[in-house]
């Protein structure tokens, strides 16, 4: 199985690049952000709790997110692998992902981190906020999301460094150029 963790700060292009990776490699897409937004749209109890947290830019609790991931892993065991988009976002989530995959004798193949400067992140997310009305794409929440990323999510890179699975990819330039850089990394681990 090919299991890719697509990593990076909010607005670095994870969702955008995931679509292209899925198309090329036929992986199952697991975006914890999308799963949480589905719960919010459905008005479930979990969704109501998650909405307030997401609108403030903080992270939803590890327990909730890990539960969602375990459910998806069980559902899609017949595929050729997964792309984890926006997960893990804490070291605890990374540890739990390792455990969950090992239940299926599986593991993360590579963690790709998209590198984009802060000013560009803010400008992309403000634009998306204007275009789509996404409630967490406003200046105050964007700034908090980036701070939360620097504080709570960056340590995940050290976790994958230790396992020699972390690869940085320059996330500036056209979507196609960035995708070509990602393909180069993925094709190396696929061999
Ligand atoms: P996410 O949905 O993961 O939101 P995100 O980090 O902003 O990434 P997204 O994939 O949407 O954006 P992308 O970079 O592709 O998370 C939202 C919230 O959910 C979190 O704040 C948190 O509260 C919660 N959450 C999610 N996962 C969690 C977890 N594991 N644990 C705890 N809480 C969790 O793209 C952004 C914009 O850039 C787009 O408009 C796109 O068009 C544009 N763009 C992309 N590539 C570009 C390029 N090359 N040039 C110019 N623009 C580009």
Image (spheres, grey):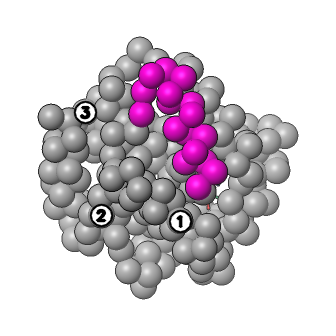
Which residue occupies 45% across, 62% down? Answer: 157
Q: Give the residue displayed 70% in from the left and 48% down from the top.
A: 62
Residue 22: % across, % down: 31, 37
Q: Name the residue under label 2.
A: 168
> Is residue 101 located in the magenta-colored stretch of the structure?
yes
Q: Nearer the viewer, mark 2 or mark 3?
A: 2
Location of residue 142 by image quarter: bottom right
State which tag comes first along the sequence, 3 or 1.
3
Lower position in the chain sequence, tag 2 or tag 1: 1
> The C terminus lies in which quarter of the figure?
top left
Q: Is residue 184 something that shows in the picture? A: yes
* Most frequent secondary structure within the magenta stretch: helix
Q: Mark 3 points at which residue?
A: 25
Point 65% across, 80% down: residue? 140
Quadrant containing the N terminus is: top left
| Residue indicated by mark 1 | 155
Q: Is residue 140 above or below residue 180?
A: below
Question: In x, y percent, where is residue 145?
Answer: 60, 71
Task: Classify mark 2: residues with Cα within 10 Å, few (<14), some (14-19) or many (20+).
Answer: some
Q: What stretch is highlighted in magenta?
A: 91-107
The residues bearing labels 2 and 3 have C-alpha atoms spaced at a distance of: 20 Å
Viewer-proximal residue among 72 and 163? 163
Vertically, is 131 above or below 25?
Answer: below
């Amino acid at each position: 199985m090919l299991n890719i963790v697509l990593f990076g700060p909010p607005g670095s292009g994870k969702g955008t690049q995931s679509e292209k990776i899925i198309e090329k490699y036929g992986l199952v897409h697991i975006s914890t952000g999308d799963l949480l937004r589905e719960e919010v749209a459905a008005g479930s109890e979990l969704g109501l709790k998650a909405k307030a947290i997401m609108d403030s830019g903080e992270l939803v609790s590890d327990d909730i997110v890990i539960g969602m991931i375990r459910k998806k892993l069980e559902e899609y065991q017949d595929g050729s692998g997964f792309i984890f988009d926006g997960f893990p976002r804490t070291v605890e989530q990374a540890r739990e992902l390792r455990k969950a995959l090992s239940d299926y004798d599986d593991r993360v193949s590579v963690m790709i981190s998209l590198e984009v400067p802060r000013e560009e992140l803010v400008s992309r997310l403000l634009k998306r906020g204007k275009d789509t009305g996404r409630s967490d794409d406003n200046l105050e929440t964007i700034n908090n999301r980036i701070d939360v990323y620097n504080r709570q999510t960056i340590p995940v890179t050290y976790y994958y460094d230790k396992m020699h699975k972390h690869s940085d990819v320059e996330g500036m330039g056209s979507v196609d150029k960035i995708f070509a850089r990602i393909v180069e990394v993925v094709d190396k681990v696929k061999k």
